[in-house]
Image (spheres, helix red, strand yellow):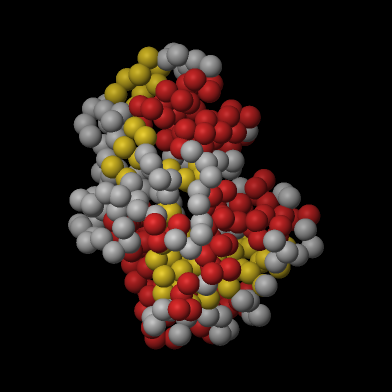
């Protein structure tokens, strides 16, 4: 197949590029390298079936030329920083909503019908049902990031209805593993590099979070969209899947595992409250039975994933300077 990947130099995008090339597909990668890392594509660039283009999906005038003869688009490009969305609200609007519209229009102009979209558990706001299914009542939005991702879901659904697209939306919990570029494990390891005696934790440490290893995420993406193609069996040609581990941990648990992996015993200092910032959901736990019913099963435990991520960060300290 001919696959186009947006955000190809990012954590998820570059990992998927490697997976798709391993499976024997031809891949075109697009990224503006604002947060993506060229280092992540070192292996892919040695493969004759991969072509990379440094482009800005927000401003490029001839985006459609990259979509010629493409079979399916994996759209990972986005602003993924939930925490600082209120500092510059325009970023989520442009990098998530406008860019997604640009991608959909480029697809439509070249008659590309299949799209896979990386959404987020953040679109669920703070639900009252746990584990949270795909068809839960979505409450008031708590972050600009979540609201922008939900808007993208709506656009993709509309293109499936109006233009006969085949759409797949995946709402992830936070992902972990090699190439992990931001999030609490990144922040904790970075702080402990600077001062191994103290770890400052936002909130009270009792926030409960589910996570997912990047390899399990990639297995779900390829299994559901390339093998099962569940949307073909639906009248609206549109599927939404929750992806996460079958359990969760407290932030304090994660901090303890990270410190153990680094071989240190710092004092923990808490900022207090039940969340770290506005938009930080204190409990994230998704019902992933729709995905598992297709035959997908996550293989990594949360503790193992957190420990592996901490070890990777310790061995790749260059990323702290890049980020």
Identity of the residue drawn at 53% across and 50% down:
216
Viewport quadrant of the N terminus: bottom right
Q: Nearer the viewer, residue 302 or 190?
A: 302
Q: Whole-percent x and y of residue 99?
A: 46, 67
Left or right, 62 with reference to 238: right
Image point (56%, 55%), residue name: 218
Instruction: Using residue 106 as the reference point, say whether residue 27 is left or right of it.
Output: right
Is 47 above or below relative to 197?
below
Coordinates of residue 80 in the picture (x, y in percent) = 43, 51
Is residue 76 shown left or right of residue 55?
left
Q: Is residue 8 above or below residue 211?
A: below
Residue 31, x across and y down, in percent: 58, 59
> Who's the residue at 24% across and 56% down the image?
141
Residue 262 shows up from this direction: yes
Between 223 and 67, the residue placed more toward the observer is 223
Is residue 218 depicted above or below 249 in this figure? below
Q: Nearer the viewer, residue 78 or 122?
A: 122
Q: Which residue is at a point 52% across and 34% down the rendered structure image?
A: 304
Q: Is residue 85 visible?
A: no
Horizontal and vertical percent position of residue 79: 44, 54
Count numbered badges in the picture. 0
């Amino acid at each position: 197949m001919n696959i186009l990947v947006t955000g190809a130099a990012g954590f998820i995008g570059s990992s998927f590029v490697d997976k798709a090339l391993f499976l024997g597909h031809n891949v075109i990668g697009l990224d503006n390298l604002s947060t993506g890392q060229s280092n992540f594509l070192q292996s892919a660039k040695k493969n004759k079936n991969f072509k990379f283009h440094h482009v800005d999906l927000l401003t490029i005038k001839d985006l459609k030329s990259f979509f010629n003869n493409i079979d399916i688009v994996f759209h990972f490009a986005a602003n993924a920083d939930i925490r600082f969305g209120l500092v510059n609200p325009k970023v989520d609007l442009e990098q998530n909503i406008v860019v997604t519209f640009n991608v959909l229009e480029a697809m439509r102009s070249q008659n590309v019908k299949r799209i896979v979209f990386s959404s987020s558990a953040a679109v669920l706001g703070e639900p009252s049902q746990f584990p949270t299914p795909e068809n839960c009542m979505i409450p008031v939005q708590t972050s600009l990031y979540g609201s922008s991702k939900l808007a993208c879901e709506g656009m993709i659904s509309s293109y499936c209805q109006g233009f006969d697209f085949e759409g797949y939306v995946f709402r992830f919990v936070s992902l972990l593993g090699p190439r992990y570029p931001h999030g609490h494990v990144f922040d904790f390891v970075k702080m402990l590099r600077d001062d191994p005696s103290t770890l400052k934790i936002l909130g009270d440490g009792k926030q409960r979070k589910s996570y997912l290893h990047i390899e399990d995420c990639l297995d779900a993406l390829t299994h559901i969209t390339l093998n099962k193609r569940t949307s073909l069996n639906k009248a609206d040609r549109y599927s939404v899947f929750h992806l996460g581990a079958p359990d969760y941990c407290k932030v304090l648990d994660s901090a303890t595992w990270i410190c153990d992996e680094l071989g240190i015993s710092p004092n923990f200092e808490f900022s207090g409250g039940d969340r770290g910032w506005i938009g930080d959901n204190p409990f994230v736990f998704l019902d992933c039975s729709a995905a598992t019913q297709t035959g997908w099963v996550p293989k990594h435990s949360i503790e193992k994933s957190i420990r592996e991520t901490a070890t990777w960060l310790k061995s790749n300290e260059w990323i702290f300077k890049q980020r």
